[in-house]
Amino acid sequence: MTKEFDIVFIGSGPAGYAGSIRAAQLGKTVCVVEAGFIGGVCLNRGCIPTKSLLHSSQIFADLKHAEKYGVTVENPAYDIAKMLELRTQTVEKVRGSLERTLKNNGIEIIKGLAKLDDNRNLTVHTKEENIEIKYKNLVIATGSKPRMLPDLPKDKVLNSDTVLAQTTLPEKTLIIGSGAIGTEWARILNALGKQVCVVEMAQKLAPAMDESVSDTLARIFKKQKIEFYTGVSIEKYEANKAFLSNGKEIEFDKILVAIGRIPNLFGLDNIPFEKERGFLKVDENFKTNFENIYAAGDITGKQLLAHTASAQSIRLVEHIFDGKKIDINYRNIPAIIYGKPEIATVGYTEQALREMNADYKVSKLPLTIAAKAFIDGEIDGMVKVMSMNGIIVGAAVVANDASGLLQQLVNAIQTQTPISKLNEVVYAHPTTSEAISEAVLNLEDKALFVPKRV
């Protein structure tokens, strides 16, 4: 069987489904090829199931401390089987909705393994048959997979994929890496009463984020009794013990490796694509070294975030069919670590501005500058904003709804709205967003509730 399309996406993750929908909106014939579940890693083995477990575990943790709010809950307990069932139901509902959306847009979904031969001819191997696909444009959106470490005890190692397949939780977990995956799983396990130790080779937690975020996360970990070590490596393993370079010995039942991701080119690895750090090398228009073959999402290695993948793919489609220039400022794409409290950053970090010898202003305030933070018990949060020439260039928020609060600042950075105009905005009271208002006002020494500078 042979089929022909204006554009074909290999992979149905955020890059695959977002780009395919946009292409369909432009009236093109579109096909999505997927070897696994529709939605890719993010929906099935990443963002969505992890956040479901985070939510469930946080409810349990909140119940254990309900008395401080005048609520008595005797002997709170959790059922991990029901938590996992809810996680699965959530994923299936979202996946079903996504698949219906693709079909309603006239997008053909072919479930099978895509392979390119030496002449870049595309064949999809399904359970029933092999389908030859003719394409005018091909987009590789096969994503990434967990990076692993050598010389680990294989029977005790987990990654972001396999940890979600567990039906029971280990009592003691050693987590290697303190980025989003490592931190979120430390929070899940800790909230459910499990022992966790996080080991980070960098000198600070969440090393890619602003230093103030790292300091705040360290305080939160200490408060929540999550053991962690920074600036150390693991020298050796013996039985169920890890020996750290600082002399510490850590006992574990499982090791969760959360040190980043590598490109997934399964089925396409025989093609001589140009690469950078193992990822597909693309030009400013996401074209590979082959005509009419493009790449978007994690596979390009530019920024491994679901919303980045979607943005890349949508802009790629608009470039192919409408000739629009692709212009993505990766520095202005928000990054978030979920849990309680959430951690969200965008733009320049303060250390980056210092290294640039930039002439910048910084405003850093505790979230409790807003009364609502006391009401909600958000005493560990903070807001930090950096500006240059009257424009915000970077921000960090630690709050229960940091992902939502930060978006105000993302919009301000993207539109380059002058701080003087931002300070004309009226914020509702009482809200934690008032902390955003105060932090921005403080850049012009206009904050109402910050002690006067002497």
Image (cartoon, rainbow, N blue to C red):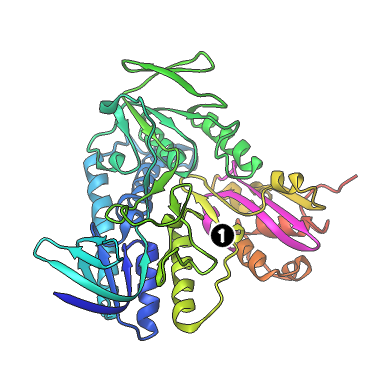
Image quarter of the N terminus: bottom left
Q: How many marks?
A: 1
Residue 309 position within the rendered picture, expressed as x and y whole percent measured from the top left: 44, 62
Please state which of residues 253 and 33 is positioned toward the viewer in this rendering.
Answer: 33
Span of residues in magenta: 378-407
Q: Is residue 404 left or right of residue 128?
A: right
Residue drawn at (20%, 64%) of the image:
124
Q: Is residue 267 left or right of residue 58?
A: left
The reply to whether the magenta stretch includes residue 258 is: no
Give the quadrant of residue 138. bottom left
Image quarter of the C terminus: top right
Residue 13 position within the rendered picture, expressed as x and y whole percent measured from the top left: 34, 61
Residue 196 position within the rendered picture, expressed as x and y whole percent measured from the top left: 41, 28
Residue drawn at (8%, 64%) of the image:
128
| Residue type for callout 1 | Ile
67 versus 234 height, above or below: below
The reply to whether the magenta stretch includes residue 380 is: yes
Dot 1: what SS? Answer: loop
User: How crowded is the residue under tag 1: few (<14 C-alpha within 10 Å), some, or many (20+)?
Assistant: some
Residue 281 position within the rendered picture, expressed as x and y whole percent measured from the top left: 48, 57
Residue occupying the far bottom of the picture: 27
Please state which of residues 66 and 325 is positioned toward the viewer in this rendering.
Answer: 325
239 versus 256 height, above or below: above
Residue occupying the far right of the picture: 454
Please state which of residues 130 and 448 is positioned toward the viewer in this rendering.
Answer: 130
Please state which of residues 7 and 393 is positioned toward the viewer in this rendering.
Answer: 7
Residue occupying the far left of the picture: 128
322 versus 51 height, above or below: below
Badge 1 is on which residue? Answer: 333
